[in-house]
């Protein structure tokens, strides 16, 4: 552990394992003031801009919609709605390209804007949020479509409900913005510090936490000063503290920031809530303030457009759904040779094949790199087992072993080395002298592991359904046999001896012909008995003949 002092905080800081120092390149976009991006002719709004189930469209083609209107309703608990960023007419609901590592299309709602920017009716503001039930505030945040704006896009209301068995004592606000080139969070902290602090106050009330730590790297002194002033202006300095930390990539990672500010380690495969901590991005905090205090859904954000292939790098306030091509055109278009177009930062961003993708809630940067900024490393060479990747890994993993097992498709062994603790920061690939694209191997192994896990679960569910069906059929057969054993069966001939007619069931079983034959036999026996009685009466008058009279008449004799 090491100590680090700062102008805004005297608290003790820690250091996480690994990390790399990168050229930040942030001055490219910081030299120009921000401006609102023009409203495009069409907005392309993906129905899934968050981790979890995608939203379900609740509008139809041809329908007129208004700014802030819900156009996609959530499906399930881990889901949030999406809203129209401006007024206009829905012209299509179809799969379109979105910024995603797979490069595949996803369902989107296309709105042809009318230029009027007419708002829908918004929910009532909740300025007295401290008197409101936390559940009500979480529901307001949910219907406002707020999700993590730092990159992970996890639904915020779910993150704010850790459960009664996981009490939260510390809220951490991430204002680190450690990736090179990106400056939108820096701008947000300088432009809207009071809104961020208001969001922090709401979060503290919902979580019942006693303190908040705001982490900011020391290459953002203006942002740190603005946030400190806002904390004092809102009179929450007894609970909220601005902590300036050393610049080191990836200190903005959730687990790494927790380590730096508190010295605590999040368990492997665990969550921060297990150690009493919840992390949120500064953009998320500002969106929560908009949702609770103004009733506004998440329909816009700051986006950095930068890179030396862009004519005028700067920050923009952008409507969600604005095409990246329109945003690049607003920045003067591309100049010179474009080597790579990225949604996000150069380390963890998504490579875009073209600019016809929309800005989403998680898109913090459009990065246009020249060949000098993103040189071709050439074909990867053989691993020389130098160990630099392990030294740089902030998750304290063994990237070399992960690489070998992922390459050999030994997915069980990859998971033995805690593959899913990898945050895909790219530090290992950055320092690799053989230029091996290590992160691509890890992403492949994760995808395959998830696919196998889904297949395994589906197989287990099918096996459980089959076993349940067999057990049900066996139970029904046992019940049927038990009913048959309990059913009374009359003895043969009992109805005739009792001088009663056979039961309906017996008659049906024996048949009508058998019943008629039995009645005829009984009539013959009765007639024979009458004859015998008559003979006995006459025998009484003639004793010699009585000894020869039969005493019993059988059925054969009666016949």
Image: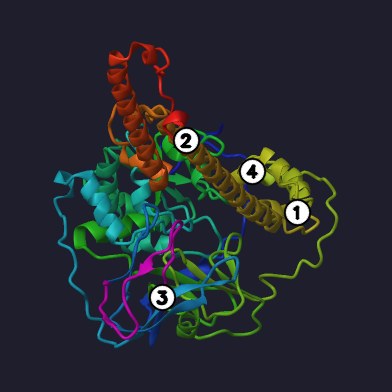
In this picture, which residue range is highlighted in magenta? 44-69
Mark 4, secondary structure of its residue: loop
**Quick one: 402 or 524, which is closer to the camera?**
524
Mark drawn on residue 321: 3
Marks 1 and 4, how far apart at CA: 14 Å
Q: Earlier in the sequence, mark 1 or mark 4?
A: 4
State yes or no: residue 400 in magenta: no
Q: Position of residue 42 (x, y in %)?
A: 39, 85
According to the picture, the residue beneath numbered tag 1 turns out to be: 432
Tell me, what colour scheme is on the image?
rainbow
Residue 297 sits in quarter = bottom left
Q: Is residue 162 visible?
A: no
Answer yes or no: do the residues labelled 1 and 2 have beta carbons within 8 Å?
A: no
Marks 1 and 2, how far apart at CA: 63 Å
Mark 3, secondary structure of its residue: loop
Residue beneath the point at 45% across and 78% down: 94
Q: Earlier in the sequence, mark 3 or mark 1?
A: 3
Answer yes or no: do the residues labelled 1 and 4 have beta carbons within 8 Å?
A: no
Q: Is residue 25 visible?
A: yes
């Amino acid at each position: 552990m090491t100590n680090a002092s700062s102008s805004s905080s005297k608290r003790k800081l820690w250091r996480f394992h690994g990390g790399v120092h990168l050229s930040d390149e942030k001055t490219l976009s910081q030299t120009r003031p921000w401006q609102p991006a023009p409203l495009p002719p069409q907005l392309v709004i993906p129905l899934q801009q968050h981790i979890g189930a995608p939203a379900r469209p609740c509008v139809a083609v041809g329908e007129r919609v208004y700014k802030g209107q819900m156009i996609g309703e959530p499906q399930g608990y881990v889901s949030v709605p999406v809203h129209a960023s401006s007024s206009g007419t829905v012209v299509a609901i179809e799969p379109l390209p979105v910024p995603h590592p797979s490069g595949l299309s996803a369902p989107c709602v296309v709105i042809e804007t009318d230029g009027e920017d007419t708002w829908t009716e918004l929910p009532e503001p909740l300025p007295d949020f401290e008197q409101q039930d936390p559940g009500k505030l979480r529901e307001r945040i949910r219907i406002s479509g707020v999700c993590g704006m730092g990159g992970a896009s996890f639904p915020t209301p779910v993150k704010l409900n850790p459960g009664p068995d996981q009490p939260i004592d510390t809220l951490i606000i991430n204002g680190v913005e450690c990736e090179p080139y990106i400056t939108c969070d820096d701008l947000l902290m300088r432009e809207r510090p009071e809104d961020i602090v208001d969001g922090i106050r709401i979060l503290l009330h919902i979580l019942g936490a006693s303190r908040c730590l705001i982490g900011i790297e020391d290459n953002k002194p203006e942002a740190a000063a603005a946030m400190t002033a806002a904390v004092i202006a809102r009179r929450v300095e007894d609970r909220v503290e601005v902590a300036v930390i050393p610049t080191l990539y990836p200190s903005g990672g959730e687990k790494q920031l927790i380590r730096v500010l508190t010295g605590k380690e999040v368990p492997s495969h665990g969550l921060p809530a297990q150690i009493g901590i919840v992390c949120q991005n500064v953009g998320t905090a500002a969106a929560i303030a908009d949702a609770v205090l103004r009733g506004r859904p998440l329909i816009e954000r700051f986006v950095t457009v930068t890179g030396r292939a862009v004519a005028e790098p700067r920050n923009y306030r952008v409507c969600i759904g604005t095409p990246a091509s329109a945003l690049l055109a607003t920045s003067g278009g591309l100049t010179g040779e474009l080597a790579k177009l990225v949604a996000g930062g150069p380390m963890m961003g998504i490579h875009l094949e073209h600019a016809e993708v929309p800005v989403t809630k998680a898109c913090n940067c459009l990065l246009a790199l020249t060949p000098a900024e993103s040189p071709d490393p050439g074909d990867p060479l053989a691993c020389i087992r130098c160990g630099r990747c392990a030294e740089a890994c902030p998750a304290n993993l063994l990237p070399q072993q992960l690489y070998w097992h992922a390459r050999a498709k030994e997915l069980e062994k990859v998971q033995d080395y805690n593959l899913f603790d990898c945050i895909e920061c790219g530090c290992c690939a950055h320092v690799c002298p053989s230029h091996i694209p290590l992160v691509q191997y890890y992403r492949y192994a994760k995808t395959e592991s998830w696919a196998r896990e889904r297949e395994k679960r589906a197989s287990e569910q099918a096996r459980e359904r089959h076993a349940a069906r067999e057990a049900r059929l066996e139970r029904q057969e046992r019940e049927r046999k038990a009913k048959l054993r309990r059913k009374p069966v009359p003895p043969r001939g009992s109805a005739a001896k009792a001088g009663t007619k056979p039961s309906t069931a017996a008659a049906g079983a024996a048949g009508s012909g058998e019943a008629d034959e039995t009645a005829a036999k009984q009539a013959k026996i009765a007639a024979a008995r009458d004859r015998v009685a008559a003979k006995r009466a006459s025998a009484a008058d003639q004793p010699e003949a009585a000894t020869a009279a039969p005493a019993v008449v059988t059925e054969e004799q009666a016949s």
